[in-house]
Amino acid sequence: CAIFPIFMLLLKLTSNYYLISKFIQYRREGIKMHLKNSIQTIFVFCTVIISSILLGIMTFLNVYQFRNTMETEVQDMLSAKSSEISTEFSNRLQRIAGKTDALARMISTMPAYDMDFAFTYMRQLVQSDPMVFGSGIWFEPNAYSAEQKYFGPYLFKDKDNSIKLTMEYSTEEYGYQKFNWYKDAMSTPGNVVWDEPAYDEVTNTSMLTSAA
């Protein structure tokens, strides 16, 4: 009879040990699972952070490279356009210089100054190019007529784009002989000279003058 209580006690102790062992085993497995989940979480977090940093760096490099490429392309485009405009402008100035030279040669070879013919030619010259504002002939003092010291007829585009004739340059007060374009043309016969841009008080216009 005394053996049975001892047996029961041993059985109870064994059961308690088994439960304690299971509890410890589950506890260990829970800790392992928790550590495993924590490690996975940390790994995922680090992966996201590193990926974000790499993506940001790649985006910055792509934007920087794209900006440099665009700046280079824009600079090349502007340079090419500037060169094109400069060449076109230079060509137009050369054509205008050719017309100035032709007018000077025509007037200088006239046996008698036919001003109607000259005005027709000058009117066509002014209308030939939007850049041409006017055209004039300035004779040396008394060269056109012994009775008229100053003679400098000038045809120009009025505000309504019509061609007008003015004789306001043919005065002693204006004195066209004092201007560089006149003096340079007289000192270099057979050549076309360009004066610096200047404001003309007669026509109230800023202009660049070619003379021959």
Image (cartoon, rainbow, N blue to C red):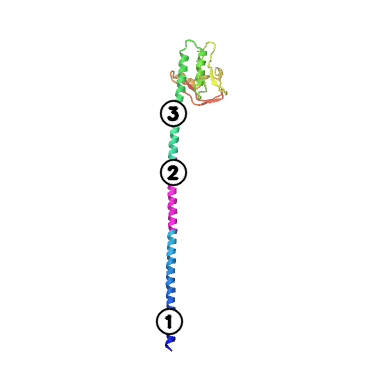
User: Of marks 2 and 1, which one's residue comes earlier in the chain?
Assistant: 1
Does residue 111 sit above or below 168 in this rendering? above
Asked if residue 26 shows in the view, the reply is yes
Residue visible at 42% across and 41% down?
69
Asked if residue 136 shows in the view, the reply is no
Please tell me how crowded label 2 is: few (under 14), some (14-19), or many (20+) other residues with Cα within 10 Å: few
Q: Main secondary structure of the magenta part?
A: helix
Q: Nearer the viewer, mark 3 or mark 2?
A: 2
Q: Nearer the viewer, mark 2 or mark 1?
A: 1
Residue type indicated by callout 2: Phe
Q: Quadrant of residue 13?
A: bottom left
Which portion, as a residue range, is magenta? 45-70
Q: Which mark is residue 11?
A: 1
Real-space CA distance between mark 2 and mark 1, rounded to the nearest whole angstrom: 80 Å
Real-space CA distance between mark 3 and mark 1, rounded to the nearest whole angstrom: 111 Å
Residue visible at 42% across and 77% down?
18
Instruction: Kindly state the secondary structure of the residue where label 1 is placed.
Output: helix
Quadrant placement of the N terminus:
bottom left
Q: Residue beneath label 2, please?
A: 66
Q: Residue beneath label 3, please?
A: 87
